[in-house]
Image: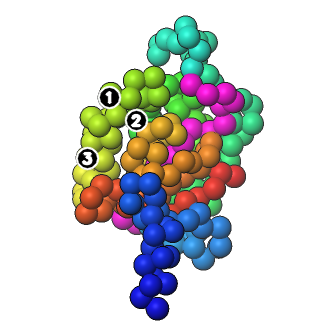
Amino acid sequence: MKLIRILLLALLAGPAGIIVAPPLSAASGEAQLWQALRSGEAAALMRHALAPGTGDPGNFDIDNCATQRNLSERGREQARATGERFRRNGIQRAQVYSSRWCRCQETARLMALGDVRSFAGLNSFFRDRSTEPGQSAATLALIEEHIAAGGTPLVLVTHQVNITALTDVFPGSGEIIVVKPGADGLQVVGRIDNP
């Protein structure tokens, strides 16, 4: 029996040895995730909605959305539907932080959960991985401080590379990773698939 438990834990462990929760699609499991978000005991770490492609064009300029990979119409619908999903699950307003990238800002705005604040720790480091440790530490600190203070739900809109660095999870477009501070970084409570 002990060997079976060890094997199961090994199967659930990610490459860095972090135990990652599988996606929860059962209604009761998802209801528990929404309750954790509503109560403020966990935070929503969300990958921006659908923006076809990978990375950004060579002429990328953070201040010019025309030079970036942006949401498709399906991505815009996905972002609006995600906001509606939050509201259906009892979250009318949230503290919302976003990467400065236009696809994240637009996702956050279209969810219509509150004012959107840019947060440098959520910016993509796809092109420059050297900034990852500092950005991940800043994001972890933001989550820890917000949850310790209690209050409104916390929603962070960012990029796949950021979420994977923090959680070892490779999220789909628009997917929400529900996290809370753990002994050694973030603990993944569960995953909410995109609408």
Q: Amino acid at mark 3?
A: Ala
Q: Residue 24 at what x, y percent from top left?
A: 60, 67
What amino acid type is highlighted by mark number 1?
A: Thr
* Mark whose residue sits in front, 3 or 1: 1
Name the residue located 49 percent from the left edge and 67 percent from the top edge.
12
The residue tagged 1 is 131
Residue positioned 59% across, 58% down in the render: 192
Whether residue 126 is visible to the viewer of this picture, yes or no, is: yes
Residue tagged 2: 122
Q: Position of residue 44 (x, y in %)?
A: 46, 53
Q: Which residues are magenta?
A: 37-55
Residue 141 - label: 3
Residue lying furthest top in this view? 59
Mark with earlier residue (3, 1):
1
Q: Helix, strand or loop at disc 2?
A: helix
Q: In the rendered image of this protein, does residue 53 appear above or below residue 165?
A: above
